[in-house]
Amino acid sequence: MDNIILIGFMGSGKTTVGIRLSYLLRIPMSDTDKLIEKREGRTISEIFASDGEAYFRQLETQCLERMKKTTNGQIISVGGGLPVQRRNHALLKQLGCVVYLRAKAETIYERLKNDTSRPLLQGDDPQGKIRRLMEERAAVYEEVADVIVDVDGKEFDEILDEIVEAEKVKECMQ
Ligand code: S3P
């Protein structure tokens, strides 16, 4: 079995959906942010603060490269900016079926307005930051996705159903 990879903007629900899918399908789950934090022994915010975003992006690609050799039959949740790097597209495709959890900017803002763990959304005008980043990223998420699930206003059970019923996901679970 290939992996099921969850992509989408920060706050789109990748981690929660990933955990629930992993219970439902009884397969393990990995998360690139968590793997990076563990390997580096520091948080994403600390990595951004001391070494900058470009360094973090290198760590993400290295993480995917390692997973390509070691990981199959899992749910993989990836950081929101990882698919923006085009060098990662082939790696994502090689890992399995890419599912995009698509959310509106308002949904993301409501979920993340009090969050302090996303360095890219700190400081003034988080709403504007979300909107601008989303404009930059929407097309690239759609380009790399095998399956797109709109998540706004949906219960998690509905989202899980849509994922497991998608033909591409079924193929990848065989
Ligand atoms: C980022 C998303 C974060 C994390 C980092 C950068 C992004 O992951 O990788 O803060 O560029 O969108 P989540 O999508 O899990 O929040």
Image (cartoon, helix red, strand yellow):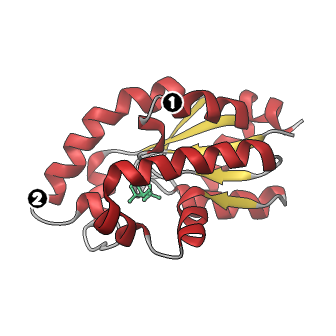
Where residue 167 appears, as percent x and y from the top left, is: 75, 28
Q: Residue at x 26, y 74 (%)?
A: 114
In whole angstroms, how far apart are the C-alphas of marks 1 and 2? 30 Å
Amino acid on which disc 2 is placed: Asp
Where residue 98 appears, as percent x and y from the top left, is: 62, 36
Label total for image: 2
Q: Residues within 10 Å of mark 2 (few under 14, many from 20)?
A: few
Q: Do we see residue 158 in this rendering?
A: yes
Where residue 149 appears, as percent x and y from the top left, is: 54, 39
Callout 1: SS: helix
Q: Residue at x 54, y 34 (%)?
A: 88
Residue for badge 1 = 87
Callout 2: SS: loop
Q: Is residue 76 above or below residue 100?
A: below
Residue furthest out toward the left: 124
Q: Residue at x 24, y 60 (%)?
A: 121
Q: Which mark is residue 125?
A: 2
Relative to 71, 111 lies left or right: left
Q: Which mark is residue 133?
A: none
